[in-house]
Amino acid sequence: MTEPTRKTARKARRNGFSLVELMVVLFIIALLATAVAINVLPSQDKAMRVKAESDIATLGQAMEMYRLDNASYPGASEGLSALVNPPASLAMPQNYRSGGYIKALPTDPWGRPYQFRSPGQNGAPFEIYSLGADGQPGGEGDDADIVG
């Protein structure tokens, strides 16, 4: 080999990354991903809870509009579906708002339907609630029921 050919060969060998360099970069990326996951995942749980509270408030407002138009809240048998379609038991269906009070019933952030209780506890005329992350009544933390 001539001298310029040897320099070119050495230079070509230096252009790539070594396995150690790649491992160091992958290790740093893994550390950063772990730090982000630790800080972001609790925020997701809080966001799901806030979304459920917002949905419940929206359903509660639709329930109040229903009462203003129809002089009473829907009964336990009609439930939240009375906000989408007029119930058969409605005394004066001509007062029911065309198109309903909401377009469609939302599901809670965990994919389950919101619950409706009429009458509500503590003297409330109704309650709209989600069973939380575990889907069971009661619970603590993220599993606690969310009541509007």
Image: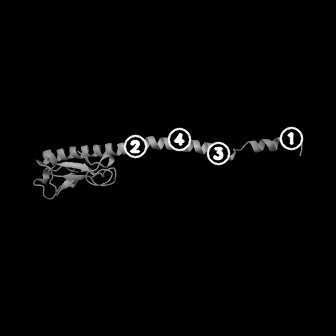
Observer-nearest of 8 and 142: 142
Instruction: From the image, tell me which residue sits under label 2.
Output: 42
Q: Is residue 148 left or right of residue 30?
A: left
Q: Alpha carbon of mark 4 to alpha carbon of mark 3: how far?
A: 16 Å
Give x and y (percent) for residue 19: 68, 47
Give x and y (percent) for residue 58: 25, 44
Q: Alpha carbon of mark 3 to alpha carbon of mark 1: how far?
A: 30 Å
Q: Which of marks 2 and 3 precedes in the sequence?
A: 3
Query: Could you classify mark 4 by the number of other residues whose Cα lies within 10 Å: few (under 14), some (14-19), or many (20 or more)?
Result: few
Instruction: From the image, tell me which residue sits under label 3.
Output: 22
Q: Which of marks 1 and 2 precedes in the sequence?
A: 1
Instruction: From the image, tell me which residue sits under label 1.
Output: 4
Give x and y (percent) for residue 31: 54, 42
The residue that appears at 86% across and 40% down in the rendered structure is 4
* Amino acid type of the residue that numbered disc 3 sits on in the rendered structure: Leu
Q: Is there CB contact under 8 Å for labels 3 and 1?
A: no
Identify the mark at residue 109; answer none if there is no mark. none
* Furthest residue in direction right, as rendered: 2
Element type where label 3 sits in the image: helix
Q: Nearer the viewer, mark 3 or mark 1?
A: 3
Q: Alpha carbon of mark 1 to alpha carbon of mark 4: how far?
A: 43 Å
* Amino acid type of the residue that numbered disc 2 sits on in the rendered structure: Pro
Instruction: From the image, tell me which residue sits under label 4.
Output: 32
Element type where label 1 sits in the image: helix
Query: Could you classify mark 3 by the number of other residues whose Cα lies within 10 Å: few (under 14), some (14-19), or many (20 or more)?
Result: few
Give x and y (percent) for residue 55: 28, 46
Q: Is there CB contact under 8 Å for labels 3 and 2?
A: no
Q: Which of marks 3 and 4 precedes in the sequence?
A: 3
Q: Is there CB contact under 8 Å for labels 2 and 1?
A: no
